[in-house]
Amino acid sequence: MSTPVTTASSSAPAPAAGAGKGTARLRTPRKHVPGRPQRSVLLTVLTGLMLLYTVVPLIWLVISATKTQEGLADSSGLWFADDFALWDNIRDTFTYNDGVFTRWLANTVLYVVLGAGGATFLSILGGYALAKFDFPGKRAVFAVVIGAVAVPGTALAVPTFLMFSKMGLTDTPWAVIIPSLVSPFGLYLMWVFATEAIPTELLEAARMDGASEARTFFQVALPLLAPGIVTVLLFTTVATWNNYFLPLIMLKDADWYPLTLGLSVWNSQAETIGGDVIFNLVITGSLLTILPLIAAFLLLQKYWQSGLAAGSV
């Protein structure tokens, strides 16, 4: 006779309702996804403050350029006046004092083309030579270039004036153009960029094919240096375009003034007895002065941004 076998239930008793409510749930830390920028509240706030610091003066300049001389005193600085006088201000700026603003604009373009263009070309030649050729005294040249970068241009203005005075070059355009040809920062930047951008094997292949050094430079190396060239050109252009102290001590003839010095003269007329108060023209001229620089940065930003990143990896 068979005896029935009783099997015990192997399942565990169900947990009581609400037993897991008090247990703490561990959060897995958020992992950083490669290629996705991390967020920082502090950095966002600082960037916003810097944006206000740079944009608010530009907004004030644009709004103030639309006002007459009376509107500047009767309206808020960050809002428009009752009358919109931008086009009248632009016309008066170019026609005031027999159109001297146009002469100052042409002088500034001359100083930029010869000074900044020449400084960029010399920086290209020097940077390429220092990066791809070995010669005695290369370390000394490197030390001189680094030391020259650390010296401000204003510290050399007085010695430069004394030297040019003995040479008889003061009160001439050459007194502004020749010092602008020297750009230690541009030379250093092209040196670093040429070291990374031009493979030595490419130069050796061109020489083995019978290319001269000049042809190797202009046809092989120069196209590879385009981002660095644009970067140096922008820096030298801005430095020459905004140059004020050097023309101030070198030039006496108002016909050779650049825009920076000419607008300063217009602004100081209000402090002289019987002088014309033309703050509206000074503001409009300042707006017209910065427009070419803004356009240059916006049109060439993809080149100079890649140039600034040279040597960062």
Image (cartoon, helix red, strand yellow):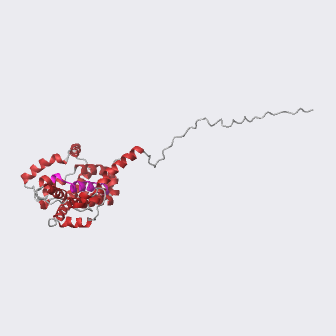
Q: Residue at horizontal 8%, vertical 52%?
A: 165
Q: Residue at horizontal 40%, vertical 43%?
A: 42
Q: Is residue 80 above or below residue 196?
A: below
Location of residue 205 by image quarter = bottom left
**In screen coordinates, is 255 left or right of 232?**
left
Q: Nearer the viewer, residue 219 or 312?
A: 312
Span highlighted in magenta in the image: 226-246
- Image quarter where the N terminus lies is top right
Residue 238 falls within the magenta-colored stretch: yes
Residue 207 in sight in this render: no
**In screen coordinates, is 211 left or right of 271?**
right
Residue 304 falls within the magenta-colored stretch: no
Q: Position of residue 71 (x, y in %)?
A: 25, 60
Q: Nearer the viewer, residue 145 or 43?
A: 43
Q: Position of residue 192 (x, y in %)?
A: 29, 49
Location of residue 95 by image quarter = bottom left
